[in-house]
């Protein structure tokens, strides 16, 4: 089942990559740009078929994909198609990029090159790929949340903690020596108690009740419904180290000191409304942005995981190889099929959301690295028009390629480190 899960999730990733490239392809064709290649993967071509003027194919290393558009890089000033190669290292690199951009150039393609399109059209072409990943993420999240449902904490007691232990030092069941009993245990709470009111206020869900508990002080009257009868308990709250409820989704755990009661709520699987799905998507988006911003500081932990055998962080970076292993872990567990499908789709949705955000980074060779020069070109054209000056022409993206190569090398090195970590020390979801 582990191998089957890995294979199925890998196929899901390939479809996500193809879906991304389809966005670029559709937008490029809409604006009359010739697209000679549409490939999923890198390296040697495994299989391909030519349809119309585009060759569609699958390559041996399924860790990405691309479409080749004619004239991605503008030619040198005064020319329409590339130029001869100069001998300087950086000049030669720039000229090689120009030449590669028109490698599949054919007669009649002069006005079908990417760089000849208006800046807003090029921006749409480059944003179409990440947008497709975002659409797929939203659809998958909606299917999971509205179709299968998600564990939703309710103000009903599932378990009563026996003793007070700081959240960051909890190591499993049982109480360490000398740990005092929790206020909930002392007050007589029992599993199954439905909390009717807390300090005279009613709360429709567990998160709002949890915040009220943390803000309260001293002895608080709590009305519970126990087997159809209401009774009032009087717990005396104490301060304890607890998880920060405002920690972004996907971030490392954070802790605060607040009032503590010691209750664990039931978490039935409940289908969500459209509004709840929107709220959840906002949380996922915020968490993904936060996680991507912290990628550089995760390098020491990755080195520790690869070379020192340190345990991987569940919220740490993961490659397409690692996330496929996670997909295998999902199917390996003996859980109801509906639960496995839900986790599987949720994981694939999270990957698509990450692909969307990563590709928006304004660095070459990512999609955002082509959007930023197009935006700058639009600004330059607008300023020139307002001043009555000639069109300044396209931004010479080829001159940025030495910097782009540097960024690409850093991205590849980081990606290789993550892949090695995913192979020698994969993340255990603990399902």
Image (cartoon, rainbow, N blue to C red):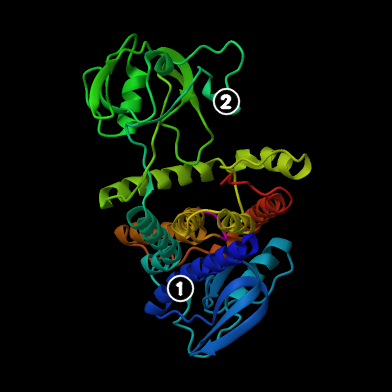
Residue 262 in sight from this viewpoint: yes
Q: In the rendering, which numbered label is found on residue 280? A: none
279 with respect to 323 (left or right) = left
Does the magenta stretch mainly form a helix, a strand or a loop?
A: loop
In the image, residue 185 sits, relative to residue 158, either above or below, namely above
In the image, the segment drawn in magenta is: 361-365
Q: In the rendering, which numbered label is found on residue 170? A: 2
The answer to whether residue 364 is magenta is yes
Secondary structure found at label 1? helix
Residue 198 in sight from this viewpoint: no
In the image, residue 206 sits, relative to residue 84, either above or below, namely above
Quarter holding residue 90: bottom right
Residue 161: % across, % down:
47, 23
Secondary structure found at label 2? loop
Are there few (<14), some (14-19), or many (20+) residues within 10 Å of tag 2? few
* Residue on which the image places disc 1: 22
Q: Nearer the viewer, residue 12 or 191?
A: 191
Q: Residue at x 51, y 70 (%)?
A: 15
Q: Residue at x 61, y 40 (%)?
A: 313
Q: Nearer the viewer, residue 243 or 95?
A: 243
In the image, residue 59 sits, relative to residue 345, either above or below, namely below
Quarter holding residue 23: bottom left
Quadrant where the N terminus lies? Answer: bottom right
Distance from disc 2 to disc 1, alpha carbons, whole Å, reads 47 Å
The answer to whether residue 56 is magenta is no
Residue 329: % across, % down:
60, 54
Quarter holding residue 319: bottom right
Q: Nearer the viewer, residue 161 or 326?
A: 161
């Amino acid at each position: 089942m582990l191998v089957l899960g890995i294979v199925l999730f890998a196929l899901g990733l390939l479809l996500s990559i193809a879906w991304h490239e389809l966005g670029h392809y559709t937008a490029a064709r809409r604006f009359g740009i010739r697209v000679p290649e549409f490939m999923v993967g890198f390296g040697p071509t495994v299989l391909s078929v030519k349809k119309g003027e585009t060759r569609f194919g699958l390559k041996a290393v399924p860790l990405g994909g691309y479409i080749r558009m004619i004239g991605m890089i503008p030619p040198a000033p005064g020319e329409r198609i590339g130029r001869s190669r100069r001998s300087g290292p950086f000049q030669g690199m720039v000229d090689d990029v120009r030449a590669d951009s028109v490698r599949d150039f054919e007669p009649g393609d002069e006005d079908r090159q990417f760089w000849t399109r208006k800046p807003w059209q090029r921006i749409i072409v480059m944003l179409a790929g990440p947008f497709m990943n975002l659409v797929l993420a939203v659809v998958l999240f909606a299917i999971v949340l509205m179709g299968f449902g998600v564990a939703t904490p309710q103000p009903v007691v599932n378990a009563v903690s026996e003793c007070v232990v700081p959240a960051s030092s909890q190591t499993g069941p049982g109480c360490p020596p000398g740990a005092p009993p929790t206020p909930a245990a002392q007050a007589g709470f029992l599993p199954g108690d439905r909390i009717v009111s807390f300090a005279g206020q009613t709360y429709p869900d567990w998160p709002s009740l949890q915040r009220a508990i943390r803000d309260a002080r001293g002895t608080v009257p709590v009305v519970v419904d126990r087997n159809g009868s209401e009774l009032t308990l009087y717990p005396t709250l104490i301060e304890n180290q607890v998880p920060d409820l405002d920690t972004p989704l996907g971030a490392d755990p954070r802790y605060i000191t607040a009032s503590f009661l010691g209750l664990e709520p039931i978490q039935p699987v409940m289908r969500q409304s459209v509004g709840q799905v929107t709220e959840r998507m906002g949380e996922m988006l915020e968490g993904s942005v936060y996680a991507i911003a912290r990628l550089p500081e995760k390098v020491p932990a990755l080195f520790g995981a690869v070379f020192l055998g340190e345990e991987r962080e569940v919220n740490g970076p993961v490659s397409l190889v690692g996330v496929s292993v996670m997909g295998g872990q999902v199917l390996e567990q003996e859980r109801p099929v509906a639960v496995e499908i839900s986790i599987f789709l949720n994981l694939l949705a999270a990957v698509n959301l990450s692909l969307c955000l990563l590709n928006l980074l304004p660095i070459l060779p990512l999609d955002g690295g082509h959007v930023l020069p197009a935006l700058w070109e639009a600004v330059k054209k607008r300023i020139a028009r307002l001043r009555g000056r000639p069109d300044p022409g396209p931004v010479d993206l080829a001159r940025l390629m030495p910097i782009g190569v540097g960024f690409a090398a850093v991205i590849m090195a980081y990606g290789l480190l993550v892949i090695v970590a995913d192979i020698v020390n994969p993340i255990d979801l603990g399902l």
